[in-house]
Amino acid sequence: MRIKIVWSGKTRDQNLKELQDSYLEKINKLERCELIETKEARGLTEGMEKRILAIEANGLEKHKMTFSHELTRVVLLEQIYSSLTIMHERQYAK
């Protein structure tokens, strides 16, 4: 499996950047993961753009809680890591 994550901008908060890097390292031990940071949401292939729009159309589960974009990135990476540990039948290392 190959995971590709595309998001706009860089993580500025150093503490969140360290968490992000930590989860990327853990994820890459289980599956290949590539993080692409763009200046803008440009540079996506037409196929990628259509897939993202389809996901948005179906809607992601919405919560009443609001997080910064940078914190949401860390949460996304943690959820990917958690899912991969389940798929690989490994104990989740907290």
Image: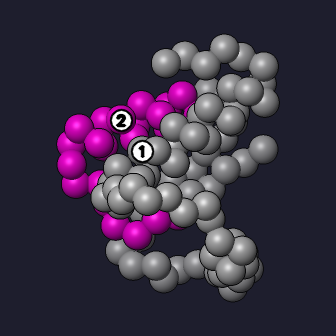
Marks 1 and 2, the one that precedes in the sequence: 2
Q: Is residue 52 visible?
A: no
- What amino acid does circle 1 point to? Val
Q: Position of residue 91 (x, y in %)?
A: 66, 14
Q: Marks 2 and 1: in contact by CB < 8 Å?
A: yes
Residue picked out by circle 2: 19
Q: Residue at x 30, y 43 (%)?
A: 17
Q: Position of residue 75 (x, y in %)?
A: 46, 44
* Magenta region: 6-28
Q: Is residue 66 left or right of residue 31?
A: left
Q: Position of residue 84 (x, y in %)?
A: 69, 33
Q: Position of residue 78 (x, y in %)?
A: 51, 37
Residue picked out by circle 1: 74
Q: Is residue 49 magenta?
A: no
Q: Nearer the viewer, residue 84 or 64?
A: 64
Q: Nearer the viewer, residue 37 or 93?
A: 93
Q: Is residue 14 magenta?
A: yes
Q: Quote the CA–CA distance across marks 1 and 2.
A: 7 Å
Describe the element under mark 2 as helix, strand or loop.
helix
Q: Is residue 68 left or right of residue 26?
A: left
Q: Residue at x 78, y 19 (%)?
A: 89
Q: Residue at x 22, y 54 (%)?
A: 12
What secondary structure characterizes most of the magenta part?
Answer: helix
| Residue 71, placed above or below residue 64 | above
Q: Which of the 4 image quadrants contains residue 50?
A: bottom right
Q: Residue at x 36, y 59 (%)?
A: 66
- What amino acid does circle 2 point to? Leu
